[in-house]
């Protein structure tokens, strides 16, 4: 999160707010608010502290109270400070910035004083301030925030789909956000439903919309008195192909529930679009990286009334086996879009599924409909993509579904990759074996610009030694999403299913340590999830959900690895452990302590 830079050339002016202690020689400044400043609503308190000892915490005090009002967010970059004090570049405070705030609505109008107390790791304490400010609660504070992307330090290059990312807050509630290019609205977002006074508003002038309400624990840590500060992030995916190549000014204007508006930032962006360089983009939603693929033994076709062991399917009208959709037990889902050029208007032409770089299914060649399921097809309805990329060509039907089976070839011992055929049977499109493999997609547009996306590692762990093989469990981790910033107690959720006897328990593993066992007796597994069978043809029951409240307050403020493992109920062997999915998440509690 960005803090406002301050010029340090006239540091002596801030002399009242600089503390120099003998020996350790810490120095620090309250940059804002300034002495005599008239304030209202949420008041930023920002500055910096340089110290050769580690700084444990920085507390804000208002009007000489003995208890702190808030605790500051620490370790914010301040290159300007290190340039002015290069001797501290290798100190214990290489990121000397801090940021916190206080709320004036609980204070009377008039003069109030603030001070900042710095506590070192050694236990030593020193104080910055006081600074006197004038509270005027008759003023409706304008919204405030910051644009993280594009950055403010250079002209950014943009082409195709370009994200504008940042955060916005207001003490009374954000009503709507306008995203502008050269003064014209190109996208819009409405305030969160929980915000005070949020009225709702349609999207931008060209039909695009944006999202407001993504999680920002860093903002919540700096502004803990603002309702819903944790959900203050925004993102707008701007289609730059609708702009003329050249330099443009991007800006974000935020309006609060009282009608007060403020432009929270502007950025200079150079747009360079060329059709041959505008590759498609997208992602694989399912499976997750390092998931396990399912195998099954070769099926047998025996006309009735004869009986054959499972799996056994009767022949279809043409004599080929009428395979049920669930036979193709490996599903790949996701979405793809293309901004393209003016000639093709951004059309995705095909999506191709690759296993170890070899194509096994192509949406143009192999798309079939089995019952209500579209398999090996592009053009599946994705309203969530349409919301995130509203105005993009084909955004509402940007989804793809692939399905395939892995069968052992008795002659070679290799695993055949089998996809559904249009006549109701199956066709072999490749071969593989047990072990670790790579799953990816190749996406091409109408200009034959082709790109590979979504490459991930998958495990093929097939037990084909019996007629009833022990197939691995599968599922999904819904929350946290990849690299989500979380804090306090966070709800981990998802679903898991096993073909052979069900699931006995799940393990929730963080950084290689099992933190929780999820099972039916504790009520943490077997939860009702009707959306799962509705969206996955392989799952026959809705009772497959799991959840767990993960306490992050005892974790370090850094990146962590979450893995969900499933143990099945095979009935004839030891339970088999399968990885359901993994996510990287970032804990950001910021050592905030509310007294």
Image (cartoon, rainbow, N blue to C red):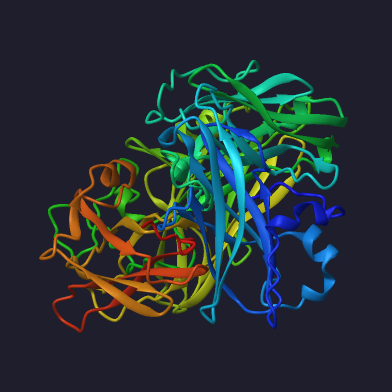
Q: Quadrant of residue 565?
A: bottom left
Task: Identify which residue, 524 or 140, lies in the foreground.
Answer: 140
Q: Residue 313 location in percent, x, y?
A: 25, 54
Task: Identify which residue, 131 or 542, lies in the foreground.
Answer: 131
- Name the residue furthest left: 521
**Above or below: residue 544 compared with residue 223:** below
Q: Which residue is at a point 75% across and 49% down the rendered structure image?
A: 5
Question: Which image quadrant: the C terminus?
Answer: bottom left
**Image-based side of 59 in relation to 464, left or right:** right
Q: Residue 462 location in percent, x, y?
A: 37, 75
**Image-based side of 267 in relation to 431, left or right:** right
Q: Is residue 303 visible?
A: no
Q: Is residue 240 visible?
A: yes
Q: How many marks?
A: 0
**Image-based side of 532 in relation to 281, left or right:** left
Q: Residue 160 location in percent, x, y?
A: 74, 37
Q: Quadrant of residue 512?
A: bottom left
Q: Residue 104 location in percent, x, y?
A: 48, 36
Q: Which residue is at a point 20% across and 60% down the rendered structure image?
A: 525
**Above or below: residue 8 compared with residue 121:** above
Task: Identify which residue, 482 or 393, lies in the foreground.
Answer: 482
Task: Identify which residue, 309 or 24, lies in the foreground.
Answer: 24
């Amino acid at each position: 999160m960005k803090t406002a830079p301050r010029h340090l050339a006239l540091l002596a002016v801030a002399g009242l707010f600089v503390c120099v202690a003998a020996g350790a020689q810490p120095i620090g400044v309250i940059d804002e608010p300034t002495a005599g400043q008239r304030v209202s609503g949420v008041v930023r308190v920002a500055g910096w502290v340089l110290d050769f000892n580690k700084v444990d915490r920085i507390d804000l005090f208002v009007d000489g109270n003995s208890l702190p009002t808030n605790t500051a967010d620490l370790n914010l970059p301040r290159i300007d400070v290190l340039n002015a004090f290069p001797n501290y570049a290798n100190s214990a405070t290489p990121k000397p910035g801090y940021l916190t705030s206080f709320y004036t609505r609980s204070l009377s109008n008039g003069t109030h004083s603030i001070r900042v107390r710095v506590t070192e790791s050694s236990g030593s304490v020193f104080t910055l301030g006081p600074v006197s400010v004038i509270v005027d609660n008759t003023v409706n504070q304008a919204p405030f925030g910051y644009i993280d992307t594009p950055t403010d330090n250079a002209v950014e290059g943009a082409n195709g789909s370009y994200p504008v990312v940042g955060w916005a807050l207001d003490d009374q509630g954000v009503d709507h956000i306008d995203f502008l290019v050269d003064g014209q609205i190109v996208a819009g977002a409405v305030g969160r439903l929980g915000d005070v006074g949020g009225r709702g508003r349609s999207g931008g002038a060209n039909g695009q919309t944006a999202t407001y309400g993504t999680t920002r624990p860093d903002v919540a840590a700096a502004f803990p008195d603002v309702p819903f500060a944790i959900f203050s992030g925004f993102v707008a995916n701007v289609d730059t192909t609708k702009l003329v190549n050249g330099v443009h000014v991007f800006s974000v204007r935020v309006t609060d529930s009282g009608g007060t508006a403020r432009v929270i930032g502007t950025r200079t962006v150079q747009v360079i679009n060329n059709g041959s360089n505008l590759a498609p983009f997208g992602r694989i939603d399912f499976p997750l990286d390092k998931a396990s693929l399912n195998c099954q033994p070769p099926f047998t076709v025996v006309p009735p009334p004869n009986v054959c062991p499972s799996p056994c399917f009767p022949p279809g009208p043409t004599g080929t086996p009428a395979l049920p959709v669930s036979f193709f037990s490996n599903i790949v889902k996701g979405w793809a879009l293309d901004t393209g050029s003016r000639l093709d208007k951004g059309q995705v032409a095909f999506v191709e599924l690759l296993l170890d770089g070899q194509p096994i299914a192509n949406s143009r060649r192999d798309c079939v409909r089995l019952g209500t399921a579209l398999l090996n097809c592009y053009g599946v309805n994705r309203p969530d993509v349409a919301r995130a990329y509203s105005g993009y060509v084909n955004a509402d039907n940007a989804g793809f579904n692939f399905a395939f089976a892995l069968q052992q070839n008795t002659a070679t011992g290799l695993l055949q990759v089998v996809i559904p055929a249009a006549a109701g049977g199956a066709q072999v499109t490749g071969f593989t074996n047990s072990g670790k493999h790579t799953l990816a997609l190749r996406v091409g547009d109408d200009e034959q610009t082709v790109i590979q996306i979504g490459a991930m590692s998958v495990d093929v762990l097939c037990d084909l030694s019996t007629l009833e093989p022990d197939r691995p469990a599968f599922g999904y981790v819904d929350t946290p999403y990849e690299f989500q910033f979380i804090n306090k107690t966070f709800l981990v959720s998802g679903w898991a299913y096993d073909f052979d006897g069900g699931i006995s328990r799940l393990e929730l593993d963080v950084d290689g340590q099992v933190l929780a066992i999820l099972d039916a007796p504790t009520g943490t597994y077997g939860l009702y999830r009707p959306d799962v069978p509705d969206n996955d043809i392989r799952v026959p029951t809705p009772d497959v959900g799991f959840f767990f409240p993960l306490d992050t307050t005892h974790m370090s403020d850094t990146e962590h690895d979450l893995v969900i493992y499933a143990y099945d109920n095979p009935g004839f062997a030891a339970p088999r452990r399968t990885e359901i999915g993994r996510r990287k998440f970032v804990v950001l509690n910021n050592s905030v302590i509310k007294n």
